[in-house]
Image (cartoon, rainbow, N blue to C red):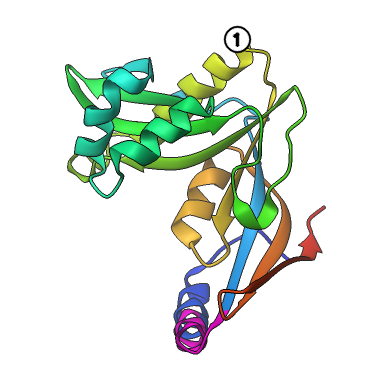
Amino acid sequence: MSAIFNSDLNFPARVINGIRWRLGRVGIRIVPFVTVLEGESPIDPCLLNNNFQFSSLNQDHISDLIQLEPHYTQEKLRNWFNAGKLCFGLRDDARLVAKMWCDLEDMFWPPAFRKLKPEEAYLFAVYSDPDYRGQNLAPTLRAASYKALRNMGASTFYSHSEYFNLPARRFKQKLGGIEKDLQIELGLFKKWNWTITAWRYR
């Protein structure tokens, strides 16, 4: 399988997502996703924007996180902080405009959950303010977070993307991300779940 995308994939992706939606209505869940190895090569400096301030976030910043992404609750974010998960953000003056969560203990994706090795970190729940689109928030946050995590002893970074989320996959490849495998989460009637590895990329 190739990791090169083209516009021809958009139509079949829409068709398959439609089929998945219909299956979901009768209790059958099918979620194909890829595991991405990140940070193996430097991010192109042309993709970085130095007009924003990078910082580590903590429980004192929960209100800022909810203002950025209102569907989260204080309880959920507090639980993540209490569990030792890390959160990094970018600010435009006082305004939080992007954030990303990191886990140094677990691969925090239920279908592929596992304990991490000491040198590994898992990246998840990335979000950028839509008002700041086109200002390279995501690559800037990624690059600064890689550096911060390396200072903590992590050197191998993983994330996941849904297989048919082509923009997310293109973005990670643009930053040098390497797709390692294609896995499929299968769920039945919200009672049983399986994850199978369908493909391992070279």
Q: Where does the image place residue 41, in percent across and percent down from the top left?
A: 65, 28
Q: Where does the image place residue 162, in percent across and percent down from the top left?
A: 55, 61
Identify the main secondary structure in magenta.
helix
Q: Is residue 184 above or below residue 3?
A: below
Q: Is residue 149 magenta?
A: no
Q: Secondary structure at mark 1?
A: helix
User: How many numbered badges does the structure rendering display?
Assistant: 1
- Residue 91 seen: yes
Q: Quadrant of residue 31?
A: bottom right
Q: Which amino acid lies under the numbered mark 1 shown in the image of this protein? A: Asn
Q: Quadrant of residue 65?
A: top left
**Residue at coordinates 54% horizontally, 24% vertically from top-left?**
84
Pick the front one: 164 or 25: 25
Pick the front one: 37 or 72: 72
Q: Is residue 190 above or below residue 41?
A: below
- Residue 44 seen: no
In the rendered structure, the answer to whether residue 92 lies left or right of residue 17 reads: left
Q: What residue sits right under mark 1 in the picture?
A: 151
Q: Where does the image place residue 174, in percent across and percent down from the top left?
A: 53, 43
Q: Is residue 23 above or below residue 168?
A: below
Q: Where does the image place residue 191, in percent across and percent down from the top left?
A: 61, 74
Quarter the N terminus occupies: bottom right
State the extent of the magenta-drawn residues as a range: 17-28
**Residue at coordinates 49% horizontally, 82% vertically from top-left?**
24
**Residue at coordinates 38% horizontally, 40% vertically from top-left?**
76
